[in-house]
């Protein structure tokens, strides 16, 4: 009997990146616009505490907060951690300390970077001040960092109406996750199968459901799924949506249809784009088949087979 070794698990770098866009309420708008104008604003709670950064609702009572006050650009380090190897996009390119700073007039601390020559120069209780960015646009990065400062003059927060010319009403924050992904043995076998234009799932020995893509274990029964089963290649559209917003760097014209497709023999539906048919003719029950990518490594999209639509009862459990 010939024994076959399982394929080596795959590994690949993966970057998930997108711009996070959000609108600002009156409190956050005033705070970020104030930073642009080199003014730090906090908000006073019902109990009289001043929160910096400000929030819109009292963390103790959930009451709406609107009483803005101006605090100082100087403060005290309450705790810190040294960062010996800054990553791209962090406030400073050279080693620095992450610090929580309670600004004078505030009762809470603000997280930012402290420019210091080394960890021996940082301590809890040290006095610091804001180093403002040369160019400011209404973002937390308008504070370039903190720097040591010996002043200990007393400061009382003063009322502020939060009004500025040309207020900041929204922000776009880029989010990025950069890591190495390993799909594991089950999905590695699945990906190797796709490279041979085969779709291979795994059957649960307890409930007999066939998972595609395989997960290595049945999430319902909690047992390993080692029995490999080839499914498809044809399948049935169970549900779908029409995409009307074009994604950045994706060379697909809108509108197009993205669907759940239950491949023949599979116990659940997978995702896939529908092509070869006008978007407004896609329907539940449509029978489809894969159209492989130019390199033949994965289905680029699915197209109608020309078969009669599947009966609803054959896929209703896979919606």
Image (spheres, rainbow, N blue to C red):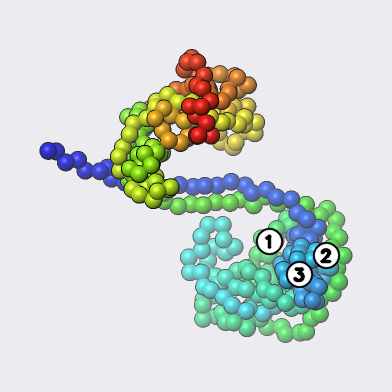
Residue 264 placement, left or right of 276: left
**Of the residues tagged 2 and 1, which is closer to the observer?**
2
Q: Is residue 151 visible?
A: yes
**What is the C-alpha distance between the residues marked 2 and 1?**
20 Å
Residue at horizontal 58%, vertical 51%? 175
| Neighbours of disc 3 within 10 Å: few (<14), some (14-19), many (20+) | few
Residue at horizontal 79%, vertical 61%? 27
Q: Position of residue 293 (x, y in %)?
A: 43, 27
Residue 81 vertical placement versus 5 (above, below): below
Residue at horizontal 58%, vertical 46%? 18
Q: Judging from the image, what secondary structure is the residue with disc 1 in?
A: helix
Q: Quadrant of residue 290?
A: top left
Residue linked to disc 1: 140
Q: Position of residue 319 (x, y in %)?
A: 53, 34
- Label ID, residue 317: none
Q: Nearer the viewer, residue 182 or 309?
A: 309
Residue linked to disc 2: 66
Q: Judging from the image, what secondary structure is the residue with disc 2 in?
A: loop
| Neighbours of disc 1 within 10 Å: few (<14), some (14-19), many (20+) | some
Q: Nearer the viewer, residue 261 or 87?
A: 261
| Neighbours of disc 2 within 10 Å: few (<14), some (14-19), many (20+) | some
Q: Earlier in the sequence, mark 2 or mark 1?
A: 2
Q: Quick one: quadrant of the N terminus? A: top left
Q: Judging from the image, what secondary structure is the residue with disc 3 in?
A: loop
Q: Quadrant of residue 46?
A: bottom right
Residue 26 vertical placement versus 14 (above, below): below
Q: Earlier in the sequence, mark 3 or mark 1?
A: 3
Residue linked to disc 3: 61
**What is the C-alpha distance between the residues marked 2 and 3?**
14 Å
**What is the C-alpha distance between the residues marked 3 and 1?**
27 Å
């Amino acid at each position: 009997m010939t024994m076959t070794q399982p394929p080596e698990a795959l590994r690949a770098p993966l970057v998930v990146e997108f711009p996070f866009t959000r609108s600002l309420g009156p409190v956050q708008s005033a705070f970020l616009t104030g930073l642009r104008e080199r003014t730090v604003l906090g908000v006073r709670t019902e109990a009289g505490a001043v929160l910096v950064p400000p929030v819109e609702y009292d963390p103790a009572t959930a009451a709406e907060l609107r009483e803005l006050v101006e605090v100082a650009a100087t403060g005290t380090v309450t705790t810190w951690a040294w960062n010996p190897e800054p990553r791209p996009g962090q406030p400073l390119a050279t080693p620095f300390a992450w610090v929580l700073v309670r600004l004078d007039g505030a009762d809470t601390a603000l997280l930012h970077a402290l420019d210091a020559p080394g960890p021996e120069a940082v301590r809890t209780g040290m006095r610091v001040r804001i180093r403002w960015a040369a160019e400011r646009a209404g973002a937390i990065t308008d504070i370039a960092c903190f720097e040591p400062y010996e002043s200990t003059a007393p400061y009382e927060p003063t009322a502020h109406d939060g009004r500025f010319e040309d207020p900041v009403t929204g922000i776009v924050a880029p989010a990025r996750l950069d890591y190495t992904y390993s799909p594991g043995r089950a999905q590695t076998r699945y990906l190797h199968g796709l490279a041979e234009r085969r779709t291979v799932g795994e059957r649960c020995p307890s409930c007999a459901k066939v998972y595609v893509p395989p997960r290595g274990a049945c999430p319902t029964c909690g047992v390993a799924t080692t029995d490999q089963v080839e499914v498809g290649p044809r399948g049935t559209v169970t549900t779908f949506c029409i995409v009307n917003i074009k994604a950045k760097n994706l060379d697909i014209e809108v509108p197009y249809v993205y669907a759940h497709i239950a491949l023949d023999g599979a116990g659940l539906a997978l995702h896939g784009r529908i092509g070869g048919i006008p978007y407004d003719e896609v329907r539940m029950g449509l029978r489809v088949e894969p159209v492989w990518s130019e390199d033949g490594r994965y289905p680029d999209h699915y197209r109608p087979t020309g078969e009669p639509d599947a009966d609803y009862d054959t896929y209703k459990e896979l919606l």
